[in-house]
Amino acid sequence: MRSPFFSLLLLFVFLQCAPAQFLSGPPKAVPSLLADTTAIAAGKPFTIGIRFELADRWHLYWQAPGDSGAAPQVEWELPPGFTAGPIQWPLPHSLKSEGDIFTNVYEGEVLLPVVIQSPAQIPQAPLVFKAKLKWYVCSETCLPGSADVSLSVPSGTPAPANVEIFALWKNRLPQSSRAPFDLEWSQTKDGLLVKIQGAPAGEKVEIFPIPPVGASSEHPETISRTFRIPTTNPGKPEGWKALVVLESGAGERRGWQLDAAFSKNGPALRSNVLPNAKTLKEGPAEPSPSVPLPPPSTPRATDGLAGILWAAFLGGLLLNLMPCVLPVIALKIFGFTQQAGESPRRVFRLGLAFVAGVFTFFLGLAVAVIGLKAAGSGLNWGFQFQNPFILTGIIAAVFVFGLNLLGVFEITLGGEASAKLSALSSKQGYGGAFLHGAFTTLLGTSCTAPYLGVTLGYAVSQPAPTVILIFLTIAAGMSLPYLLLTSNPTLLRFLPKPGAWMERLKQAMGFLILGVAVWLLSVLGQSRGTDALSGACAFLLMLGVGCWLLGTLRSRLLSLLLAVGLGIGGYFVFLKEPLERPFSALRSASGSETEGWEPFTPGRVEAELAKGHAVFVDFTAEWCLNCKVNERVTLSRPEVQAAFKQHAVVMLKADWTNGDPAITAELNRFKRNGVPFYLLYAPGAPDPKVFPELLTPALILEALAALPQK
């Protein structure tokens, strides 16, 4: 267990096997395809409209989303010989969200026309036009969506179809006529200036910048009819475009999309040309794609980052107090006691090795988050405990660690090698300290400390540099106590002096670590059933025999081969099939019916509120020790249960043990990325009451007493 190679191997396997959960939610956007013709003629273009019907108070993004968001994307699968033009984007509306975030959106319904060119000869096969769509739909939170939609249009003599809806959205496209104004462009050190000259008096003027590929901008700042567009990476100025919208007093909106024009010598130039202007049938020029940014429900990385980093630091510091971390912390303090009589420099270097393990683990998590985001997936805190294969590996590592502390086996160098390599013994110590750091962090992720859930929910939606910075700040908070203890030798003097008691303490900690393995086995049993639990016990028995042989046989090579062989054989014989078997998530053996708890679904909450019932939702998981502490100390108390019944509160349990996508979406809606999490919905209240992650009976009773009397 002291090998740095083992720690790096464990971390590599952990990151490579991490499952991704794509955030899902209710269907707030329903896509479909419409054609403007009843039939297709050879060589004649026609238009297919990508239609989105949006739920009330939800919105979809324009081609340049603004401060955050992402535009819909389409991938066509067309019959042979047909080609598709770019999406034509109707005029958007500007929407201001909390945190001074402006986005360019569509609400209610939108039709995105795409011109399709037919070949000179129409194929005989059925003409089916398929589109793979991806989008973000947002309200107070954002949900990613995807769908495969299709449309069948016969060949023959064309006749107009869906006339009204295509006419409506054609009138909302940027106009191809000359604009009744001029744009004067200039570049500053921190952005662009666009001055509108000659626009009709009495009309409201809006500007929607369209950055070139690789550039991004914040929302324009208006000074009279001059717009300042802040940007940190403007790219080539001539690559910019702008949509200018004039709105009359009667609410009529007209728009023109114009290219930017700059003088190479510096003075501003004017532009009044729609880029490659064409009609709806021909389609406008393809716009430059925008760079997707975080959704509007999440602050930009530059807004309040210092506060987020402070919360991340506190969360990392408080991780040291979590019950799943305390056994390993006791082992580390034990190690500091052993080192108290050694050179202060060596003790400090061992502390740095431990801190390096913590930082390496968190850096690996940050890299995993960035990689999974790039693949279009989501990530949640504690995901390693939701994957049975990763969980089994953690159980095996904890079990072997416990046996090592009990003295079943030791990893040491043989006689001659020990004599020759005695000078390298310190490196083994550094490797063990590094492993302790990574191992402590691995166990700590099953508990979400105060602040950490919100911080991680924010982190996973940010650009890569911000993700890395936040995760490293959490690592700094978790590492601080160890760094202080090892950097100041005077603090080590307050620890007990070495003696025979240390071996007994080491063995006692071994039993405590085995207790952690038992807890993890219960998590596996709850998620995969009794067959997986019994198989895991048999696998650990074989692994234990292998460790015993490793500690008794004289031949190191033979004992190592036998130990590895027994471990691998035990896995394939007893555990592989139960872990791979399809299953339905099992409910907790505590008996939800007897305690009044029922399974959570978002629809159930809405249904109970419609009946006038208050609803309490417990977001929990079998691998979350904080959740279990809250359940035993607070939620199961007789006075709390009696208060729930007195106020006729419907109690729902959102069991996240296996990473339920609906529960993941609900946590994301409240900007949370882990459990525990608790909500109390009151009939008629606009928002639920959010409880802190550490509950007390007084908190629950006070909230229940404030519910409206029936």
Image (cartoon, rainbow, N blue to C red):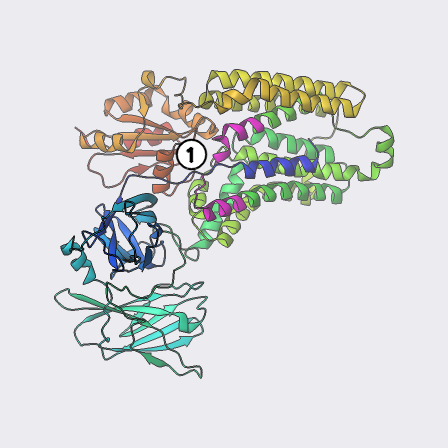
Residue 628, position as x, y percentages in the image = 44, 25
Query: Residue shown at 24%/77% (left/top)?
Result: 181
Picture coordinates of residue 104, whole percent (x, y): 29, 59
Say above or below: 580 vs 159: above
The quadrant in which residue 675 appears is top left
Compared to residue 168, the image places residue 364 above or below, namely above
Depth check: give the residue in front, 121 or 220.
Answer: 121
Q: In the image, residue 631 lies at what x, y percent? A: 40, 25
Q: Foreground: 377 or 289?
A: 289
| Helix, strand or loop at mark 1 | loop
**Direction from residue 396 to residue 617 in the image, left or right:** left
Q: Quadrant of the N terminus?
A: top right
Q: Which residue is mark 1?
A: 675
Above or below for 79 versus 637 = below
The C terminus lies in quadrant: top left
Residue at x 24% of width, y 53% of height: 49
What is the magenta segment's predominant secondary structure?
A: helix
Q: Which residues are magenta?
A: 366-393
Please say if 537 is above or below 157. above
User: In this rendering, does residue 376 appear at all?
Assistant: yes
Instruction: Look at the image and say whether residue 320 sits in the magenta stretch.
Output: no
- Who is closer to the viewer here, 78 or 497? 78
Identity of the residue drawn at 56% across and 41% down: 478
